[in-house]
Image (cartoon, helix red, strand yellow):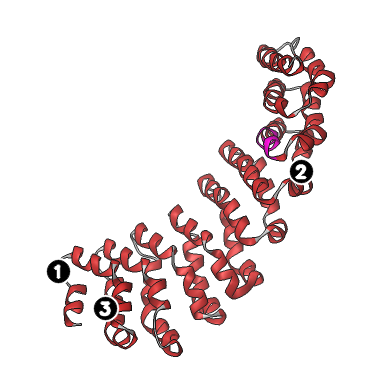
Amino acid sequence: MPTLRNCAEDKSWRVRYMVADKFTDLQEAVGPELTSRDLVPAFQSLLKDCEAEVRAAASHKVKVFCENLKPEDSREQLIMVNILPCVKDLVIDANQHVKSALASVIMGLSPILGKDKTIEHMLPLFLTQLKDECPEVRLNIISNLDCVNTVIGIQQLSQSLLPAIVELAEDSKWRVRLAIIEYMPLLAGQLGVDFFDEKLNGLCMTWLIDHVFAIREAATNNLKKLVEKFGKDWANTQVIPKILAMSRDSNYLHRMTCLFCINVLAGVCGPEITTRSLMPVIVSLAKDNVANVRFNVAKTISIVLPLIEPSIVKAEIKPCLVEMETDTDIDVKFYAKEALASADGIINK
């Protein structure tokens, strides 16, 4: 043990790094008694090391180290007195790799500490990391929400962490909003469809009318991933009606977003929903008073044509495209001609 303690305090940070990287293997080898007496102080030292690489390596081992502490009746006390103070410092560490390493495992302490201590001591740390400026830290917290959910329950989770997620989703900085959108499918999978519909569905629809194009674009792709996760029936009741309502919005950008959503959703929703629900709206927008909307109608038709029966293409879509070919706008004519060629190809198969 003196050799191990010396290695954990070696002048070379690479030696200390290797000790941190193999620490849980050492813990398993020496057994519970020596771990409590000698390894806990050494682990504390590594978590407080002056080199970020060493702190990051030690942070990665926090969950497993705590899980392996024996006997279990004194484990909680060891963590609260010796490990948790170090963890609190690491949550606000200056190095993002250290914070990211900790965020990837910190949620795993919840099952060890139990409901009361998680709520009192861990939730504030989770909230701090959820608002961290580093995207990887936020992602690691969101990726492991299920660890906390099983301990404190969905109700407590909704009262604590979800308001912070919603706050980030409405942040004035569009890049912060964008980051949360990208995490949403993952979050949906963690929380389940019922909870998602109640708490987060409205937020996803609000992003579709954001004033920043990158947000609107990300929101449409987000809907596609959500439909892939929750299924066509969910899309038909929770998503499609809200998207189709945008086709009647007075803001032409929102009407265009409706078309962009159809572009990405048609494939995952399938031929039946596309033909029954989406196609009539596309055709109705062909008469829009804004040229940008009209030529996007032609582009959308080109995308969804493979999902439509040839007889319907001939009876309903081709006449619409023929009329669009005579439009006064040159771009509308161009894209209508392209779509018409595709329609003819389907009809004449």
Residue pointed to by mark 3: 42
Q: Which residue is mark 1?
A: 11
Determine which residue is flagged by label 2: 242
* Label 3 or label 2, whichever comes before in sequence order: 3
In which quadrant of the rendered image does the N terminus lie?
bottom left
Dots 2 and 1: beta carbons under 8 Å? no
Whole-angstrom CA distance, mark 1 to mark 3, is: 15 Å
Where is residue 208? Give x, y as percent.
66, 41
- Residue 149 image offset from top left, x and y in percent: 59, 69
The image position of residue 212, as x and y in percent, is 58, 38
Residue furthest to the front? 349
- Say left or right for 268 vs 322: left
Magenta extent:
261-268
The residue shown at (59%, 72%) is: 150
Which secondary structure lies at badge 1?
Answer: loop
Per the model, the C-alpha gap separating discs 2 and 1 is 63 Å
Mark 2 or mark 1, earlier in chain: 1
The residue positioned 69% from the left and 31% from the top of the image is 256
Which secondary structure dominates the residues rendered in magenta?
helix
The amino acid sitting under disc 1 is Lys
**Quarter of the view holding residue 87:** bottom left
Q: Which mark is residue 208?
A: none
Residue 65 among those drawn in magenta: no
Question: What residue do we see at 67% from left, 11% from top?
Answer: 330
Query: Which residue type carries mark 2?
Result: Lys
Name the one closer to the observer, 23 or 81: 23
94 vs 271, nearest the viewer: 271
Residue 83: quarter of image: bottom left
226 above or below 23? Answer: above
Q: Amino acid at mark 3?
A: Ala
On the image, the x and y values in percent for residue 275 come to: 80, 32
